[in-house]
């Protein structure tokens, strides 16, 4: 008599029949063996090489987080003597991080995961992010070292001599002002450079740091065979070979033509000779770069088929983690306020940044940063509401939309966008006044902050359309009345979203999406199982009329404020 093949259902039935008569311990043992034999679902890793730490998140196919871990640079790798993950040099302008610290952090992180019993063989794909604008300079011969990594040794031991520059310039560096001026002149001016690369010249951008290295330490430049961003450097470690820079992170270099999605020859020529070879060809952010190197297969148990999806910058990864789509805007209300925009047709300007979109090839993202965020709100709360957020919220409820025409600008420190400083108050006739009642002051602050966010977003090409959502996160997003003003000023519903580890989550989502992107599957289709943002408030029926008119006055008054302020290096960078 021929035996029927046993599938998982018949096995369970057989096991149930045995267990009815078997001792409990024997039954439990058989159940464990059956469960162990069942295939486990694949996992997707997202890593983030940020300024202060290296983090990792693992998700399953349902987008549930199954593992998290981190390495803190200052405390867990104290021999590098960093503070906040960086070295601030004597001139206060040069800020770097030891590239070997990042390598050793990856050793430590993967060892932690291995000791915790993490099953690397289940990882089907991985991706990651790195702090934007950091540059890594690989020494001649490093490619051979990467290709021949010995799984019996850690990465740090084998890459000791892998870098021509031991301390990588990072986003806090502002020491390349002369190179910025040179690049803008070569491109035909700051606005023309912004039209090509998405940003005017910034000291922290990698292109200007490359130019500075060539001019000040030519021997180290000559000893360089490849230049990576922090993101593509990290991907290179997993590949065992040089990883391409992706379009999105490459947009933060002052070198990539964001429309042609290739290096700008004008910018390359103005920066360094033979730079296209040193950078390699950029690739889409959804590209699968290859499989993990045999080093990770043999040392940690990764599957040989585990795919490496292009790594990107931390801000693009955050956009992916927030799951923004066309027309959306995200506002992070923290110590500084950051605005993320999804754009179809950007208008690069002298403020903010336009990057290639990390999850939609034909789209763009924009980024605006405002220094005067929660700390300014807290100062006004202390002065006008006796330190009470409840009283602060009551003032917003009790004052009318538009604040009877009163408009305020609150720049406790030199602002980035726009480059201005000081507190400036204007009445309904655009006359400057010295003080207001506490209630008027509170509303003027919050309305002024959000009018500024809207004005500068629209200058980059953002427009409010039916279906627009504003996603709010950060400390101030817990205040219902502040969010109501945000909703009114933008005439759009406001949702709240948990952004803890958004860069890691975004990287894990991108790892999953990278496997199917070439088949035409959209990013939003891949992440549809993720928790939805929560609707908090909708705009008042009269909000559109009030704030459309107010925005025109606000723009005119901002120009008056700017005429009184001489931009500094801090505001330019």
Image (cartoon, helix red, strand yellow):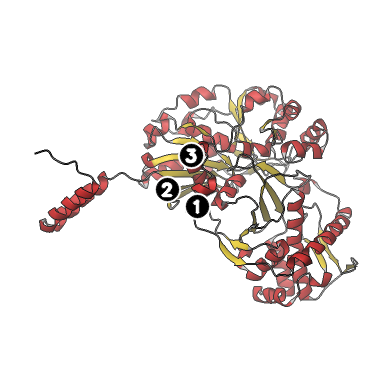
- Tell me which numbered mark, 3 or 1, is placed earlier along the sequence: 3
Quarter of image, res 523:
top right
Above or below, 294 relative to 98: above
**Image quadrant where one finds the N terminus:** top left
The CA span between labels 2 and 3 is: 13 Å
Element under label 2? loop
Above or below, 207 relative to 367: above
Disc 1 crowd, CA 10 A, few/some/many (<14, 14-19, 20+): few
Q: Position of residue 117 (x, y in %)?
A: 35, 46
Q: Does residue 87 appear left or right of residue 20 in this picture? A: right
Q: Nearer the viewer, residue 76 or 415?
A: 415
The CA span between labels 1 and 2 is: 11 Å
The numbered disc on residue 76 is none
Residue 78 shows up from this direction? no
- Tell me which numbered mark, 2 or 3, is placed earlier along the sequence: 2
Q: Nearer the viewer, residue 5 or 233?
A: 5
Q: Nearer the viewer, residue 571 or 263?
A: 263
Above or below, 234 relative to 460: above
Above or below, 342 relative to 257: below
The numbered disc on residue 61 is 2
Q: Does residue 240 appear left or right of residue 21 in this picture? A: right
Q: Position of residue 401 (x, y in %)?
A: 75, 71
């Amino acid at each position: 008599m021929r035996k029927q093949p046993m599938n998982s259902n018949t096995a369970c039935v057989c096991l149930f029949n045995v267990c009815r008569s078997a001792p409990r311990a024997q039954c439990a043992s058989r159940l464990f063996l059956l469960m162990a034999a069942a295939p486990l679902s694949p996992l997707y890793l997202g890593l983030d090489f940020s300024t202060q730490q290296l983090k990792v998140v693992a998700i399953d196919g349902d987008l549930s987080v199954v593992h998290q871990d981190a390495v803190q640079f200052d405390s867990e790798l104290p021999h590098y003597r960093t503070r906040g993950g960086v070295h601030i040099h004597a001139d206060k302008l040069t800020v770097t991080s030891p590239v070997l610290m990042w390598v050793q952090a990856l050793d430590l992180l993967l060892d932690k995961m291995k000791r915790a019993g993490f099953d690397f063989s289940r990882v089907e794909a991985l991706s990651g992010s790195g702090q934007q604008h950091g540059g890594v300079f690989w020494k001649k011969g490093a490619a051979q070292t990467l290709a021949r990594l010995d799984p019996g040794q850690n990465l740090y031991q084998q890459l000791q001599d892998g870098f021509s520059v031991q301390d990588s310039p990072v986003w806090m560096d502002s020491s390349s002002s002369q190179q910025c001026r040179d690049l803008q002149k070569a491109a035909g001016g700051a606005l023309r450079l912004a039209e090509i690369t998405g940003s005017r010249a910034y000291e922290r951008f990698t292109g200007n740091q490359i130019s500075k290295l060539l001019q000040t330490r030519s021997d180290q430049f000559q000893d360089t065979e490849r230049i990576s961003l922090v993101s593509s450097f990290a991907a290179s470690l997993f590949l065992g070979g040089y990883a391409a820079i992706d379009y999105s992170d490459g947009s933060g270099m002052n070198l990539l033509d964001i429309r042609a999605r290739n290096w700008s020859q004008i910018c390359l020529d103005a920066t360094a000779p033979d730079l296209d070879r040193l950078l390699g060809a950029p690739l889409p952010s959804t590209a699968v770069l290859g499989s993990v190197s045999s080093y990770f297969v043999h040392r940690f148990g990764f599957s040989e088929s585990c795919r490496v999806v292009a790594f990107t910058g931390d801000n693009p990864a955050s956009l992916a983690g927030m799951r923004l789509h066309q027309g959306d805007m995200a506002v992070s209300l923290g110590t500084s306020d950051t605005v993320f925009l999804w754009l179809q047709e950007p208008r690069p300007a002298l403020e903010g940044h336009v990057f290639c979109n990390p999850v939609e090839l034909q789209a763009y993202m924009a980024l605006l940063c405002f220094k005067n965020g929660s700390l300014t709100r807290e100062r006004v709360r202390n002065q006008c509401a006796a330190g009470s957020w409840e009283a602060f919220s009551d003032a917003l409820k009790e004052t009318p939309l538009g604040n009877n025409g009163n408009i305020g600008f609150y720049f406790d420190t030199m602002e980035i966008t726009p480059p201005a400083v000081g507190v400036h108050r204007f009445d309904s006739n655009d006359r400057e006044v010295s003080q207001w009642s506490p209630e008027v002051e509170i509303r003027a602050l919050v309305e002024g902050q959000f009018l500024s966010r809207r004005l500068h977003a629209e200058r980059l090409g953002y427009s409010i359309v039916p279906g627009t959502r504003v996603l709010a996160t950060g400390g101030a997003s817990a205040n219902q009345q502040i969010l109501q003003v945000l909703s009114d000023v933008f005439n759009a519903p406001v949702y709240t979203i948990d952004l803890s580890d958004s860069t890691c989550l975004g990287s894990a989502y991108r790892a999953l999406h990278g496997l199917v992107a070439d088949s035409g599957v959209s990013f939003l289709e891949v992440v549809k199982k993720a928790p939805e943002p929560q609707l908090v408030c909708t705009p008042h029926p009269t909000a559109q009329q009030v704030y459309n008119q107010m925005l025109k006055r606000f723009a005119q008054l901002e120009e008056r404020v700017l005429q009184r302020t001489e931009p500094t290096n801090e505001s330019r960078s």
